Image: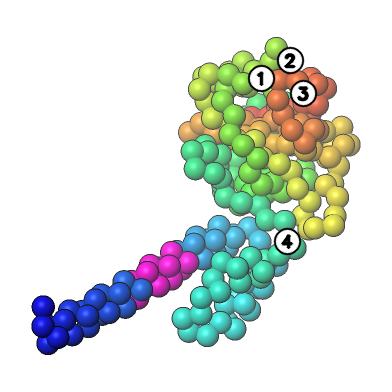
């Protein structure tokens, strides 16, 4: 190979390396932007105070800035965030529901689901965030399954959501639905035009949960 031939080949290798680096940078920026947009959509309807901080953070970024997710995390730090349902969840994220039976009508009245907040006609509300997805066949107390209690299929998806305080540093408010005690977990089953709700006083729900931890079960129908 002559020196004249080697020089163009060397230049091409350098150009290829530079292009590979540029492509990698563009890919990382695209992923960063996609994650940021997803995070924004998740938080948009559920964290009013945090939205202001996110907007301020985004406004201070220069064009093409790459602090991305880290900056977004810093912008919403300190705020307990109710999240959208996890993939595969059957929980409703918004809507209004009327009581499906007299027991529900007497205890709670109607139910409004706004983001991850459950608002009852009796004036009480619980703010939640995802905990896990349980199957209908799972037991929520010794010898008691979600399927049997809710008259649901064994493979029904029950979304368990942790009840959280409205703001960091505050306590979860007591509920009349739980006998004047705070709720720890909400279980939601959505099937077409019906929503079943179970509230528990404990922070976890499993086969060893005491039966007394169940505050009650209420059923709602879509309006």
N-terminal label among 4 and 2? 4
How far, Cα to Cα, is label 4 from label 1? 33 Å
The reply to whether residue 120 is visible in this rendering is: no
The residue at which mark 3 appears reads as 209
Label 1 residue SS: strand
How far, Cα to Cα, is label 4 from label 2? 36 Å
- Report if the CB atoms under discs 1 and 2 are less than 8 Å apart: yes
How far, Cα to Cα, is label 1 from label 2? 7 Å
N-terminal label among 1 and 3? 1
Dividing the picture into quadrants, the one containing residue 133 is top right
Quadrant containing the N terminus in the rendered view: bottom left
Label 3 residue SS: loop
Residue at 37% across, 69% down: 24
How far, Cα to Cα, is label 1 from label 3? 9 Å
N-terminal label among 2 and 3? 2
The reply to whether residue 199 is visible in this rendering is: yes
Q: Residue 140, position in %: x, y? A: 69, 22
Q: Specify few, some or many for label 3: CA neighbours under 10 Å numbering under 14, 14-19, or 20 or more.
A: some
**Picture layout, residue 145 above or below residue 174:** above
Residue at 66% across, 47% down: 129
The residue furthest top is 143
Which region is colored magenta? 22-33
How far, Cα to Cα, is label 3 from label 4? 29 Å
The residue at which mark 1 appears reads as 139
The residue at which mark 4 appears reads as 79
The residue at which mark 2 appears reads as 142
């Amino acid at each position: 190979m002559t020196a004249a031939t080697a020089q163009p080949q060397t230049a091409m290798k350098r150009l290829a390396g530079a292009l590979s680096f540029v492509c990698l940078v563009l890919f990382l920026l695209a992923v960063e932007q996609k994650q940021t947009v997803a995070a924004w959509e998740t938080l948009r309807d559920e964290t009013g105070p945090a939205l202001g901080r996110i907007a301020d953070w985004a406004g201070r970024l220069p064009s093409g800035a790459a602090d991305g997710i880290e900056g977004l995390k810093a912008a919403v730090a300190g705020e307990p965030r109710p999240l959208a349902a996890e993939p595969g969840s059957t929980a409703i994220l918004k809507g209004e529901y009327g009581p499906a039976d007299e027991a529900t009508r007497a205890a709670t009245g109607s139910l409004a689901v706004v983001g991850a907040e459950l608002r009852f006609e009796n004036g009480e509300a619980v703010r939640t965030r995802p905990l896990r997805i349980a199957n209908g066949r799972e037991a929520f107390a010794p010898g008691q399954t979600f399927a049997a209690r809710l008259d649901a299929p064994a493979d029904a998806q029950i979304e368990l959501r942790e009840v959280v305080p409205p703001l960091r540093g505050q306590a979860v408010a007591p509920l009349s639905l739980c006998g004047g005690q705070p709720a720890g977990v909400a279980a939601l089953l959505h099937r077409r035009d019906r929503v079943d709700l179970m509230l528990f006083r404990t922070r976890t729900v499993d086969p060893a949960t005491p039966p007394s931890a169940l505050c009650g079960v209420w059923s709602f129908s879509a309006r």
